[in-house]
Image: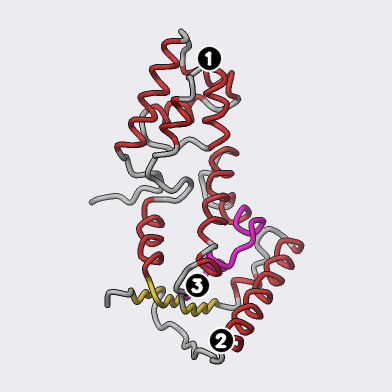
Amino acid sequence: MASISSGPEPSDSLAAFGAALRVFRERSLLTQEQLADRLTYSVASVASIEQGRRMASAHFVDRAEEALGAFGVLRAIARHVGRQPGLASWLRAWAQLEATAVSLCTYECRVVPGLLQTEAYARAVMLNVPPPPMEEELTDRLAARMEWQKLLTNRTPPIAFSFVADESVLLRHSGGEEVTRGQLDRLLACAMRVLRCSWSAGRCASRQAAPAASSVRSSGS
């Protein structure tokens, strides 16, 4: 049975960056352990990046450039790495559908929909899924989640959204009382922004509850 990986799918650009990192590390006569110590990253992170299984964060690239004297090569390659950092394989496939969708209907019974999560709530959810991510991986995931949420306001043409969540999602108080209060404020702010946008455009779109977990209608359908 094929498994669904939560990590990045290998790509030529990831492999190219990893190979370049390894060349500059070996040129500096450093082991992966020694480089990890200089960068204040884990040995597993360095190994994963060299093997093309993980995308380096901007912070990692900058630290590696300085530590290895890479003449700007690592930064140049990093600009062309073709993967969204911090997004699991299944979520990247979904994000590609969302990028071309004209409407999106989502139902959640476990957590607040990802597009509506605050950073604090998203952090609490990510830390609650074993095995918990290391700090640098968590930072990458949160940055990707916040970037993904720009679909709510920055897409042209805009997407027609419909979010339905079970009441238990909020009653769980994931992350504690303060995080939950912040998440409720976020939901209210999103609801008011959508309402204002609808009326300012001279219309109010009808939103129906989604019968399935998620559905997307693309512009090509």
Q: Which of 82 and 163 is in front in this view?
A: 82
What is the quadrant of the C terminus in the image?
bottom left
**107 falls in the magenta region:** yes
The residue that label 3 is drawn on is: 108
Measured in 3D between alpha carbons, the distance from the residue under mark 1 to the one under mark 2, in whole angstroms, is 58 Å
User: Is residue 97 depicted above or below 187 in this figure?
Assistant: above
Say left or right for 37 vs 159.
right
- Residue type highlighted by circle 2: Ala
Q: Where residue 58 appears, x then y in whole percent?
A: 54, 36
- Residue type highlighted by circle 3: Glu
- Name the quadrant containing residue 67: top right
Say left or right for 204 vs 89.
right
Point 43% across, 16% down: residue: 24
Q: Residue furthest right?
A: 178
The residue that label 1 is drawn on is: 34
Question: Which badge, 1 or 2, comes first in the chain's sequence?
Answer: 1
- Residue type highlighted by circle 1: Gln
Which residue range is magenta in the image? 106-123
Q: Which residue lies furthest to the left in this view?
A: 1
Of the residues tagged 1 and 2, which is closer to the observer?
2
The residue that label 2 is drawn on is: 201
Q: Element type at marker 2?
A: loop
Point 54% across, 44% down: residue: 140
Question: Which badge, 1 or 3, comes first in the chain's sequence?
Answer: 1
> Callout 2: few (<14), some (14-19), or many (20+) C-alpha neighbours within 10 Å?
few
**18 falls in the magenta region:** no
Marks 3 and 2: in contact by CB < 8 Å?
Answer: no
Q: Element type at marker 3?
A: strand
Q: Element type at marker 1?
A: helix
